[in-house]
Image (cartoon, rainbow, N blue to C red):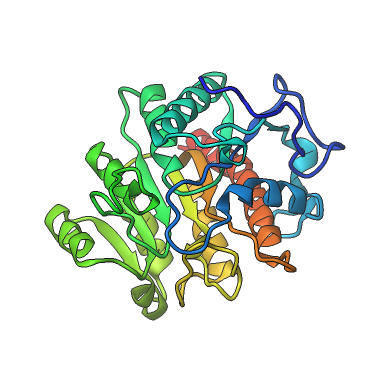
Amino acid sequence: MLAQTSTAVTPFLGADVAADYAAAQVVILPIPYEATTTYRRGCETGPDAILAASQQVEYYDEELDWETGLDVGIYTHPAIADTRSGAITSEEMLQVTKETVFKLVRDGKFVISLGGEHSITTGIVEAYRQAYPDESFTVVQIDAHGDLRHEYEGSIHNHACVMRRIVDMKLPTVQIGIRAICKEEADLIKEKNLTVLRAREIAAQPNWIENAIAAIPTEKVFLTIDLDGIDPTLIPGVGTPEPGGLNWYALTTFLRGVFDKHQVIGCDVMELAPVTDSVVSEFTAAKLVYKLIGYHAKGSEVRSEERVTR
């Protein structure tokens, strides 16, 4: 396994609420890897920017009526696969990511990984396949781009290929907010009959959230969020922005519905590339991560109550 770059880490939300590893229910895993970005660089600095911005997030979540971070133990893991310290091959990144996430899942942690470029998700999903060898799960992707190319710029592990690698794993997928694909990707969507809710379709369908959740075929879900899936007026700090995309309340309503109806086994938040002299992107991303933590905890309660009443 690649050495971690440092044992020093800014804890998510701050030292006052940080839990030690043994007590933590949730682990935040920074993966500041960047090697194949094709437009605007900077996503290797994304995890640290999210952690720094999280210090300004209110503990009290007015939607959930809960000081989530005071009740849910959150441990922030040292960074892995950090390209700021030197070049790392995609194979090395995928291996250390798979090994680290698998260990965390085996220890019973709910893992939220912070990228870094979206190619990282291949290693994360491989870890969950190893952790759940006899159970299928659906990868739900929020993204502006299909990421379904077989290869791009000479690499099958380019960030533009991550969902193709997951489709090749024979896992079901549901893609949300897509608004930029190439002809190769369009052909693959038709050939494989992939479930894709395009942004322009979402804008015209009042019931898109219910339809999207109903399209998830398995109980277990892994959730991957490329921040360019959100409208760039809300999060301009991404590497490959596209006009359109989800607004904040559409996003959070959809996410809460997924957590309430399905067992979300893990999440990642990818591709933050901070903008100079602006903190809006990283703060919004940090608040999104906090929402994921709260929805995970509340969703577990909802589904437990439903099982009891059946």
Q: Residue furthest front?
A: 86
Is residue 106 something that shows in the picture? yes
User: 202 or 299, which is in the foreground?
Assistant: 202
In the displayed structure, does residue 41 sit left or right of residue 275? Answer: left
**Total marks drawn?**
0
Q: Residue furthest left?
A: 191
75 relative position to 163: left or right = right
Residue 192, image x and y in percent? 16, 52
Determine whether 33 is above or below 198 in the image: above
Q: Residue at point 42% right, 32% down?
A: 94
* Residue plotted at (51% across, 63% down): 40
Residue 221 shows up from this direction: no
Occupied quadrant, residue 211: bottom left
Residue 176 appears in which quarter of the rendering?
Answer: bottom left
x, y percentage for residue 224?
Answer: 46, 48
**Rendered position, 68 above or below 207:** above
Q: Residue furthest bottom?
A: 204
Residue 177 image point, x, y percent: 40, 66
**Residue 9: horizontal and vertical position, in percent?**
74, 34
What quarter of the picture does the C terminus occupy?
top left
Measuring 35% from the left and 47% from the top, which residue is drawn there? 162
Question: Is 109 positioned to the left or the right of 225 in the image?
Answer: right
